Image (spheres, rainbow, N blue to C red):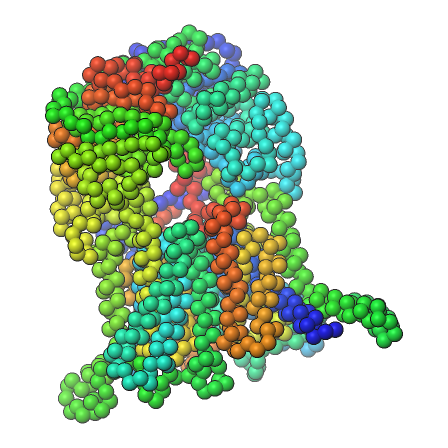
Amino acid sequence: MEEKTNVTAEKKKVTIPRGDPAVEMIGITKTFGSIVANSSVSLSIYHGEILSLLGENGSGKTTLMNMLSGIYFPDAGTIKVNGKAVSIRSPKDAYDLHIGMIHQHFKLVGLLTAAENIMLGLKGKFVLDLKSVRKAVRDICEKYGFDIDPDKKVYDMSVSEKQTLEIVKVLYRGADILILDEPTAVLTPQETQRLFGIIRNMKADGKSIVIITHKLHEVMAVSDRVAVLRKGVYIGDLATKDTNPQQLTDMMVGRAVSLNIERPEPENIRECLKVENLSVVDSEGVTKLQDVSFTAYGGEILGVAGVSGSGQKELLEAVAGLQPAKPGSSIVFTDMDGKTSSLIGKTPMEIKKLGVHLAFVPEDRLGMGLVGDLDIADNMLIRTYTEGNSVFVDMKRPRKLAQEIVKEFEVVTPGITTPVRKLSGGNVQKVLVGREISGNPSLMMSAYAVRGLDINTSYTIYRLMNEQKKRGAAVIYVGEDLDVLLELCDRILVLCAGRISGIVDGRKTTKEEVGLMMTHLPSEEAQA
Amino acid sequence: MIHISKRVDFTLFKGKAAWMNRFIGWGIRLLAVALSLVVCGVLIYALTKLNPVKVYAVMANGVFGTTRRVWAWLRDLALLLCISVGLAPAFKMRFWNIGAEGQVLVGGIATAACMIYMGGMNIPTPLLLLIMAATSIVAGAIWGIIPALFKARWNTNETLFTLMMNYIAIQLTSYFIPKWEHPKGSNTVGLINAGTQAGWFPSFMSKEALAKLDPNAWYTGLLKNTVGQPYLLNVLIVIAIVLFMFFYLKKSKHGYEIAVVGQSENTARYAAMNVKKVIVRTMTLSGAICGLGGFLAVAGADHTISAATAGGRGFVAIIVAWLAKFNTFVMILISAVLVFLEKGAIAIASEFSLSNDVSHIIKGIILFFILGSEFFINYQIKFTGKSGRRADK
Amino acid sequence: MSTTVIQIITLITTAISFGTVILFGSLGEILTEKSGHLNLGVPGIMYLGGIGGLIGSFLYENASASPVPFVGMLVALAGTLICSVLGGLIYSFLTVTLRANQNVTGLTLTILGSGVANFFGGSLSKLAGGVGQISVPATSSAFCATQKLSDALVALVSKGASSSGFLRVLGGVLDGFDKVFLSYGFMVYVAVIIAILLSLFINRTSKGLNLRAVGENPATADAAGINVIRYKYLATCTGAAISGLGGLYYVMDYINGTWANDGNIEALGWLAVALVIFATWKPLRSIWGAYLFGALYWLYNYIPGLTRSMQEVFKMLPYAVTIIVLIMVSLRHKKEDLPPSSLGLSYFREDR
């Protein structure tokens, strides 16, 4: 598991002469509790360049940039802007230094118009001077090639329009250094192309642009230079023209590390879940999943890989009856005794009544899987409280179950009457997984089951997944750590932008192959 | 610079630290009540020039001085408690039922209607009381269901909806008063069935039966002061409701659903609950119990109906339920204190011929202090150096 | 003039003078709610405003041998502003700084306000060593003073009235104009002016824009460098001052400078909360809304043959109409008509 040892040796120091840097971050460290988000990171941003900040989920890219934009304050390290050491304590400080960041979650007021959002909080005349804002907005749009209606309300805007507005807002406030956090995550390919055009225009105007991303083809397409972070550590930077996706992937994911996760050979394979042409559109009309077809077998672990937001959440929720699927989709479940039932269009209650033993460990543990203010024993009831004919809930069994889980998984808690909200992340997850397994599921789905957990707890979770596999349950494991997926799963389904870019054999594939599939659909290969 | 953060939770630790945390919480609350009593004492001193300690003695005497007064206190306590307990399930579900005042009133109207139209039918008292209770429950439930349906279906703002329903109920009461007025032209309903006392809560032992008891026996006084009193039934009904609600919220499947829906609708859907059904069902119950409060007020206390039958208790009960954090037993404590203050303040007012409204002032001051104290329980304040770490999380 | 016309004119004047009380209350509440705070203490604040003005002018009139109405008016105004802003301060300290629950704090403020007002309203003259009902005739006269069209014009018209049909009609029209538009104390016009100014402030100024952002999305406003806490305090306290004027108008003009312990102010206060919903948080809409509420409330007087019971049903109309508006708003889900998004929620920066 430990791979830090070679990090320094791997660092590829490439100095690209560019004159004085606009921003220098020197030895920046930031921790949240026991988690080190950034460990002594040094990074420079030069005038008039497009810099890609590349890294996997949780590699500390956004945290690093948040320290430039005044959201966080570093624990240690120095930030210099144009050679002068500065202290950035609020977004306003950042604006004053001409640094602006466009966050993944837009900071816009839906009820206000574009122009009003741009004006917000600015010192100006008492009477709202929308006329001059409109003119300024139009000037900015003309200069860089935006298209935005200053009088359109934000709630009427598409995601891409909102993003454009955020960029215009930052430019209006005089930013020379623009940081874009995963700007293409919410855009269609056409919108992405348009955005890249704008970014190039801004560069031509002398602005510096930082793009936080984990998509390699975008890095190659738009940036001048790439800086790579991995697990909070700065790995190195390269001129884009001197590198290739393969090299970047290696830097981003690191060398394949042996984790020694057990992987028993699948036995008694049987069809368990057959998904065909599954498409999901969210409430805002955005397509989250498109024509997804696959089969999960009892007795194997099917891994699901993909950059975050590629449709993993929707996939699991559609199976669990929490997400309506588009007409034409089909989800057929086969129980251990061969009984088949269609899950499409069923509510969770109806699925439960069909007798489908389905375990689901959702990504949002305290927001969906558990109730934070209820204690451990009460949380055991979520799946079973309706059992029995009594109007009262049977508290004996959940208490016993809670005690068993606390004991077996070594949950650190004063007792089973402690609200789960007060437990640490790892212990919360043990409680949740323990409960879901206790129902002897024939299908076990988990999303990011080891996110935020320490090594020991992670291994416990892997062991539990394997136990379910040996029991004959079909396990669907959505993960973000490719090393884990490669060692734990029998097959790996790779999602890219809501579609399946392939299903590979976990024993034969390589990290590089999966990494590339995550960012490329087979059809895109030709274009790229 | 002052830095405010959520208070660290000590309950994660075993033993002493957990108790310390609880102790801090109750200590802060007690301090708040003590402070508010000092402020009230100063206020009363300013108005009456009376030694504040003596003031509280007058209050205690005004509330507990005689058996009659104690029972009046119990009666008012029971009514406030009944409404607070009725609100508990709605609040636990995070449904802001501000409409208790109206739900009590329609319950009262239903009760009064039964008394007026069925009072002369010679229905046996227990049966008549049952019918009255049932109609008041139905009336209150209807008043609760209406906003709940709109909340469940269209997410209509329930705070404002239930608030408006109060005034519909008040006008509805005013509609019936001229129809039922007695004597004619008084624009009040007067005591309903003053002669027959049909539909009034009975004493468990009549005066005649009590008179037959041996006046020297040890139990005579006890019986006179308990089963001989007319308000015992109010108290018993409310005790039953308190117990019912305690177990309903803590132990029943419905209570479990309420807790989960109140915490997170996402989790409720994950747990295969029908969120809309839970909302409507819970508000039906909440309205029903508040409606029963109207039954207690009309049949068990006032024996008449007016727009002031609920008398603002529907609003005070909201505060009680909120402060008690949905724990029905804590509600007993808070209602007891509030009703004591109210009655005590009235005693002071009448002793010094001041207006009864002084009781509202005292109630308001104490509630403000308790409300403010919650902050110091949930947050801690650190005085840091000259630079606040504002951008730091 | 025909009786119908006279009746309509009286209904309008009744509606306007009644509506002005709730107009003040709702304008203050609109400003408060725009900052994201649902203040259910409006009735309490109106009580405080009313009694504050009454106490001020009472003390002045008691102390002065021949009280000057104008001075009395200023003293009353000062008393109202002090008391109602104090109420607003208590509320904002608890809900903004101490993050107490807004509903519960507001209701408590209503209890306290009604207690303070009715206590002093009932015992003020006794506490001051006097007897009988509290009364401030001089101050009240300043509030009730009305204007008319130029007397000369009216005299001219009425002189010719007998001879010419046209002039007779004109005289009637002028008289009607006087009654409908000019027969009120100055506070009625103040309310309309405040409504217009408030609307301009909210929609046309940069501070108003910031305020709307605070009520919609305090985290975003905070990130844009707006001092969220200060906006909340200022909006709540200014709102309280405006609501308090409603109590002052009621005491000084509507019931002519006395005190009535009848709970009317509380009922009017809740009507003001209803009006905020009816007006969908828009000050201009609440002007005609207030008058409409007044007209609906008093409509029963102008419908012949109503029993007393049916009269009460008519008084239900403003509330029923408000519920219908509330339902319509949630059905149509037009964003501009919805309550401010953060209404009722406390803001704590580190919760982000």
* Place of residue B288 in the rendered image (x, y in percent of width and height, measured from the top left): 32, 65
Above or below, B53 against A189 in this view is below
In the picture, measured across the screen, residue A190 lies left or right of residue B138, that is: right
Give the image quarter of residue B117: bottom left
Q: Looking at the image, which is closer to me, B252 or A329?
A: A329
In the picture, measured across the screen, residue A456 lies left or right of residue B274, that is: left
Q: Looking at the image, which is closer to me, A218 or C33?
A: A218
Above or below, A266 against B243 in this view is above
**Residue drawn 24% across the image and 59% down it:** B248
* Place of residue A52 in the rendered image (x, y in percent of width and height, measured from the top left): 43, 18
Q: Looking at the image, which is closer to me, C36 or A355?
A: A355
Extreme residue toward the front, this view: A328
* Place of residue A424 in the rendered image (x, y in percent of width and height, measured from the top left): 25, 38
**Residue drawn 45% across the image and 76% down it:** B176
Q: Which quarter of the figure is the N terminus of chain B placed in?
A: top left
Is residue C78 visible to the viewer in this orientation of the structure?
no
**Residue drawn 29% across the image and 46% down it:** B268
Is residue A107 visible to the viewer in this orientation of the structure?
yes
Tell how many labels: 0
Q: Which quarter of the figure is the C terminus of chain B placed in?
A: top left
In the picture, measured across the screen, residue A421 lies left or right of residue B142, that is: left
Give the image quarter of residue C102: bottom left
**Residue drawn 45% across the image and 71% down it:** B172
* Place of residue A96 in the rendered image (x, y in percent of width and height, measured from the top left): 55, 30
